[in-house]
Every structure is written in C-alpha cells, then in structure tokens.
Amino acid sequence: MKRWIVGGGLSVLIGAVVGGIAQQNLANTIRYPEGYRSWTHVKTAILHPGHPLYSDFGGIHHVYANDKAARALRQNAKKFPDGSIFVFDLLEAPTQDNATGEGKRKVLAVMVKDSKRFRETGGWGYAAFAEGDPKKQIVTDMKTACHNCHAGQAQHDYVFSQWRP
C-alpha cells in the first residue's frame, strides 16, 4: 500500500513537471512567420523614453495580421478564430535632423490563436525571435514573458490592436 501511494505521488509530481515543461516548450513550436510583411498592416506606434515599457519595448512597433486575424479585427469580433496570427515587429527608432526612422530590428514577436494547444493562455501562443532571426527564439515561458501583460486585454480576446476604420 505504501509503495502504491509513494509511486502514485511520484507519478503526479513527474506529470506536473513534464506538463509545465511541455507548456513552456509550446512557444518553441510556433514557427517564424515567413512573408508577414505582406499581411495586413494594422498599426504603427513609437514608444519614446519616459514610457513605462520603454526599457523593454522602446522603438517603432509595426503590427501585422494574417487574413483570419484581419477579418476578425475589421468585424470587431469578440473572439478571434483559431489560426489568427499577429506579428509585432519592434525596431530601434533613431532620430537624426528631427526625423525618426527605422533602425535595427530588436525583436519579432508572434501571437498565434490555437484554443486547444494554448488553453492556459486564453487560447494564444506566443513566440519571440531576437533581432528577427528565426534561429533565435527567446520566449521560454509564454505566461510570464507575454500573456501576463496581454491579460489586461481579456475583453478584446487578449489583443491590444483594434481596427481603425
């Protein structure tokens, strides 16, 4: 009996650890979004020094949506369909002669809707690629690296961008 309880307890513990690792590694299953710059451009924003997120996200932000996500945005949908993808392209924003231009790419972040794979994060999976390099995926824990911030947008299905007519 004791052996069964100890064995069962170890199985639960191992299952929890493996489950946690599997959830973290789901980010590594999100592919680099080839061709995203031909998708719908949703918006551009610039975070300047003084913005609370400047240290992590300062620069020029371009947001792109694939066809499914763009269609849902245009329809002001309450939920995005599985297969929706957003890309957040973050570039340095050098200013010279009173003009701000695009500098070096800092990070390319991807948000993929798959309700079954990403249940713990509202149906969204997140990945980020340092300098936009497909070989430099840097998100290992989607919940703390991405979703905790997106949780404030739960009323918009965790998406910050809205369609501007």
Image (cartoon, rainbow, N blue to C red):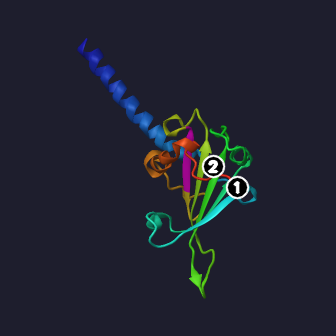
> Of all residues shown, which one is farthest toward the top?
1
Q: Residue at x 52, y 42 (%)?
A: 154
Comparing 144 with 47, the one in front is: 47
Please state the horizontal and vertical placement of residue 38, each as a whole percent of the image: 76, 58
Q: Residue at x 66, y 60 (%)?
A: 43
Q: What segment carries the magenta color?
A: 123-128
Residue holding disc 2: 31
Question: Crowdedness of circle 1 by 10 Å Cα count: few (<14), some, many (20+)?
Answer: few
Please state the horizontal and vertical placement of residue 37, each as a whole percent of the image: 72, 60
> Of all residues shown, which one is farthest toward the left?
2
Please state the horizontal and vertical placement of residue 59, each as a whole percent of the image: 55, 70
Question: Considering the numbered disc 2 on the image, is that residue within a helix, a strand or a loop?
Answer: loop
Q: Within the magenta stretch, is there residue 40?
A: no
Question: Crowdedness of circle 2 by 10 Å Cα count: few (<14), some, many (20+)?
Answer: some
> Of all residues shown, which one is farthest toward the front?
165
Residue holding disc 1: 34
